[in-house]
């Protein structure tokens, strides 16, 4: 039987990006870094997809 793991891990950068007690510039920078991180992850995973990914 396969074990299904619930993904509840929130990166610390999310707390900065969407936290209420941060200056707007810091939140925007954190959101941009999250987008770059997500793009880099997708790009890395695309190399492992049989049909080429992108």
Image (spheres, rainbow, N blue to C red):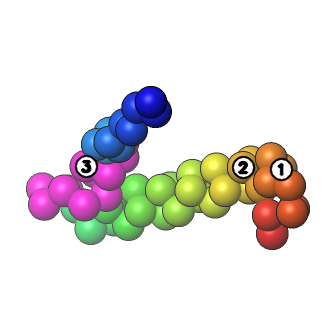
Residue furthest toward the front? Answer: 1
Q: Is residue 54 above or below residue 38?
A: below
The residue tagged 1 is 47
Q: Secondary structure at mark 2?
A: helix
* Distance (Cα) linking label 3 and label 2: 25 Å
* Residue holding disc 2: 45
Residue 40 falls inside the magenta stretch: no
Query: Which quadrant would the N terminus be assigned to in this image?
Result: top left
Q: Residues within 10 Å of mark 2 (few under 14, many from 20)?
A: few
**Which residue corresponds to the image point at 25% horizontal and 49% vertical from the top-left?**
15
* Label 1 to label 3: alpha-carbon separation: 30 Å
Answer whether labels 3 and 2 touch (C-beta < 8 Å): no
Q: Tell me which corner region of the image, top left, top right, bottom left or bottom right, holds residue 7.
A: top left
Expressed as whole percent of the image width and height from the top left, the position of residue 25 reads 34, 65
In primary-sequence order, the first of circles 3 and 2 is 3
In this picture, is 25 found above or below 19?
below
Give the image quarter of residue 30: bottom left
């Amino acid at each position: 039987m396969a074990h299904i793991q619930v993904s509840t891990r929130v990166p610390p950068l999310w707390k900065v990006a969407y936290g209420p007690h941060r200056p707007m510039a810091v939140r925007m920078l954190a959101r941009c870094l999250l987008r770059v991180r997500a793009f880099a992850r997708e790009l890395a995973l695309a190399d492992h997809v049989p049909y080429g990914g992108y």
